[in-house]
Image: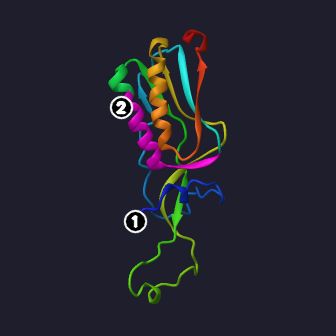
Amino acid sequence: MVKRPAYCYSRVDRPPYTRKKFIKGGPEPKIRIFDLGAANKEFPVQLSLVALEKCQISHSALEAARVHVNRYLTNRLGRENYHMRIVPYPHHHLRENKMMTGAGADRLQDGMRRAFGKPIGTAARVKSGSCLIFVRTNPDMAQTAKQALQRGRHKFPCPSKIIVEKGAELLR
């Protein structure tokens, strides 16, 4: 089966489907690591990537953004000069009613009858104004962290913006 595009799953139009006790099977989330860099160090500047609309972000999009931002920061700053965290966790299970394609498929399946769907992945539900990724670093490295967040925000289906939360006076 071919994977459907992200816009099929990015809208929040149904109730959440999160109760593991009722869900049989389905893949585990791709994203496993949420904290990267030097988590125990104190950094004066924090930059956050904030969602502007509510949406669902798939586990593969979270993992793609994590890999992209982390690789950029590690290559430019080194592993000890930043702390990055992916904030949302993919609790919501995505369902798909798989349809057959090809010759004779109309005689082999029932169409929309009992079309609840089987779990095909997970997604994180995000509200407007909630933080997606934050990076803490030193003031002289803040522009590099901002560039990394700008590159990572292209992986998400919702519009977002970068906010300097603490240490804004240090950047001037």
| 158 vs 10: above or below | above
Label count reads 2
Q: Residue at x 49, y 14 (%)?
A: 42
- Helix, strand or loop under label 2: helix
Front-most of residues 5 and 108: 5
Q: Which of marks 1 and 2 is nearer the N terminus?
A: 1
Q: Marks 1/2: CA distance?
A: 29 Å
Q: Is residue 58 found inside the magenta-colored segment of the image?
A: yes
Mark 2 closeness class: few <14, some 14–19, many ≥20 residues within 10 Å: some
Q: In which quarter of the image is residue 88?
A: top right
The answer to the question of whether label 1 and label 2 lie on touching residues, with beta carbons closer than 8 A, is: no
Q: Which residue is drawn at 54% across and 56% down?
A: 7
What label sits on residue 2 in the rendered view? 1
Residue 13 shown left or right of residue 84 in the figure: right
**Residue under label 2:** 71
Q: Which residue is drawn at 58% across and 81% down?
A: 113
Q: Which amino acid does label 2 sit on?
A: Arg
Give percent across and percent down for residue 5: 48, 58
Q: Residue at x 65, y 43 (%)?
A: 53
Q: Is residue 140 visible?
A: yes
| Magenta-tinted stretch | 54-72
Q: What residue type is labelled 1?
A: Val
Q: Can residue 39 be seen in this view?
A: no
- Helix, strand or loop under label 1: loop
| 59 vs 117: above or below | above
